[in-house]
Image: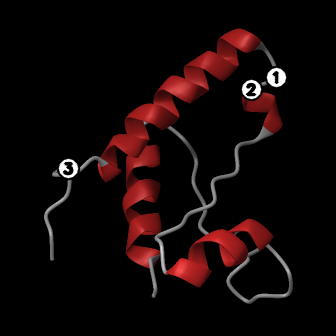
Amino acid sequence: SDFDHLAFDLEQSLSVEGFETALNAPYSGKGGGGLIYSIHRHAKTVDVPFLELEIRQDLIEIPERAREVAARVARALEVFRPGALAVD
């Protein structure tokens, strides 16, 4: 299955939280080549939706900033709460 729409939903939600977002940049695991092993091993084999989120180290280098970033990411992930999105 293709879950790109989930990535677009999260990208928008993260942008609302003030994050700079870039899908599949500077690299992508979509082409295979051994990238994102866990997704291929644990999600694709059972057709479960998956996303990989990468956060720059400088945004979380001190505990206070890490907590702030965690709270913002948690709010952005609310987009996946049941009932948060209209079903196609």
In this view, the mark in front (3 or 1): 3
Label 3 to label 1: alpha-carbon separation: 31 Å
Judged left or right of residue 39, residue 70 is left
- Reading the image, the residue beneath label 1 is 61
Disc 2 and disc 3 in contact, CB within 8 angstroms: no
Residue 67 shown left or right of residue 3 in the figure: right
Residue 56 in percent (x, y) is at: 76, 41
20 displayed left or right of 8: right
Circle 2 sits in a helix, a strand or a loop, which is it? Answer: loop
Decide which of tag 3 and tag 1 comes sooner along the chain.
Answer: 1
Q: Which residue is mark 3?
A: 84
Which residue is most to the top?
Answer: 64
Q: Using a 10 Å C-alpha cutoff, classify the residue at mark 1 as few (fewer than 14 neighbours), some (14 to 19) or many (20 or more).
A: few
Three-letter amino acid code at the position of disc 1? Glu
Tags 2 and 1 touching, CB below 8 Å: yes
Amino acid carrying mark 3 in the image: Ala
| x, y percent for residue 13 | 38, 48
Q: How many residues crowd mark 3 within 10 Å: few (<14), some (14–19), many (20+)?
A: few
Give SS at disc 1: loop
Residue 80 visible from this viewpoint: yes
Q: Residue at x 57, y 54 (%)?
A: 21
Q: Where does the C terminus fall, quadrant-wise?
A: bottom left
| Residue wearing tag 2 | 60
Q: Is residue 26 visible?
A: no
Where residue 69 appears, as percent x and y from the top left, is 59, 27
Kindly report the distance in space between the C-alpha atoms of the residues bearing marks 2 and 3. Answer: 28 Å
Q: Amino acid at mark 2?
A: Ile
Disc 3, disc 1: CB below 8 Å? no
| Residue drawn at 63 percent across, 53 percent down | 53
